[in-house]
């Protein structure tokens, strides 16, 4: 169902977020959360869980990454006040993680994979448009 608010814009569905990042989520993605804003430029926050043995290479390649995740790298070093409203967005609590920052076409995509829990990995992905 499509609907608009008083300002004429509508809320995005998950498939639109996937189109924006350039790939569907991995088939094993669970507990998917996402939010989007379009105040100055489109920004998308995605969080989902995966089994720890999941190979993320096909997903990263579809996003435009030519490199793999870097162990102990985070593109989210500090909490962002704009993201505080999303209780499910907690990448800075990870103690074992790998990350990636990529510039794909006209989008910046930042990914952190929280490898702390033994039974699953949590993927945090923030993407934003570099155009207005």
Image (cartoon, rainbow, N blue to C red):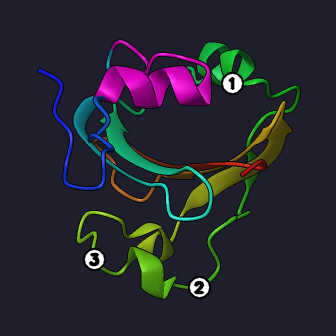
Q: Residues within 10 Å of mark 2 (few under 14, many from 20)?
A: few
Give the numbered dot on residue 78: 2
Total labels drawn: 3
Residue placed most toward the observer, 119 or 91: 91
Q: Which residue is mark 3?
A: 85
Rate crowding at label 3 as few (under 14), some (14 to 19) or many (20 or more) other CA atoms within 10 Å.
few
- Residue nearest the observer in this picture, 25 or 38: 38
Q: Which residues are magenta?
A: 14-27
Residue 110 visible at all = yes
Above or below, 26 relative to 46: above
Mark positioned earlier in the residue sequence (1 or 3): 1
Residue drawn where x is 33% and y is 55% of the image: 117
Q: CA distance from mark 1 to mark 3?
A: 26 Å
Residue underneath mark 1: 63
Q: CA distance from mark 3 to mark 2?
A: 15 Å
43 drawn magenta: no
The span from disc 1 to disc 2 (Cα, nearest Å) is 24 Å
Q: What percent of the width, then of the height, locates residue 2?
A: 18, 25
Task: Residue at 64% x, 13% y: name it.
Answer: 58
Q: Secondary structure at mark 2?
A: loop
| Labels 3, 2: front one | 3
**64 lies above or below 73:** above
Which residue is most to the left? 1
**Callout 1 touching callout 3 (CB < 8 Å):** no
The numbered mark, 3 or 2, whose residue comes first in the sequence reads 2
**Badge nearest the viewer, 1 or 3:** 3
| Of 86 and 31, the residue lying toward us | 86
């Amino acid at each position: 169902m499509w609907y608009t608010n008083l300002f004429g814009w509508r809320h995005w569905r998950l498939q639109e977020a996937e189109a924006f990042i350039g790939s569907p989520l991995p088939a094993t993605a669970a507990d998917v959360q996402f939010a989007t804003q379009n105040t100055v430029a489109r920004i998308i926050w995605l969080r989902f869980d995966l089994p720890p043995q999941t190979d993320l290479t096909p997903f990263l390649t579809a996003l435009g990454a030519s490199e793999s995740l870097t162990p102990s790298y985070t593109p989210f070093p500090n909490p962002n006040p704009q993201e505080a409203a999303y209780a499910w967005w907690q990448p800075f609590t990870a103690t074992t993680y790998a990350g990636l920052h990529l510039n794909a076409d006209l989008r910046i995509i930042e990914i952190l994979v929280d490898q702390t829990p033994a039974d699953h990995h949590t993927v945090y992905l923030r993407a934003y448009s570099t155009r207005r």
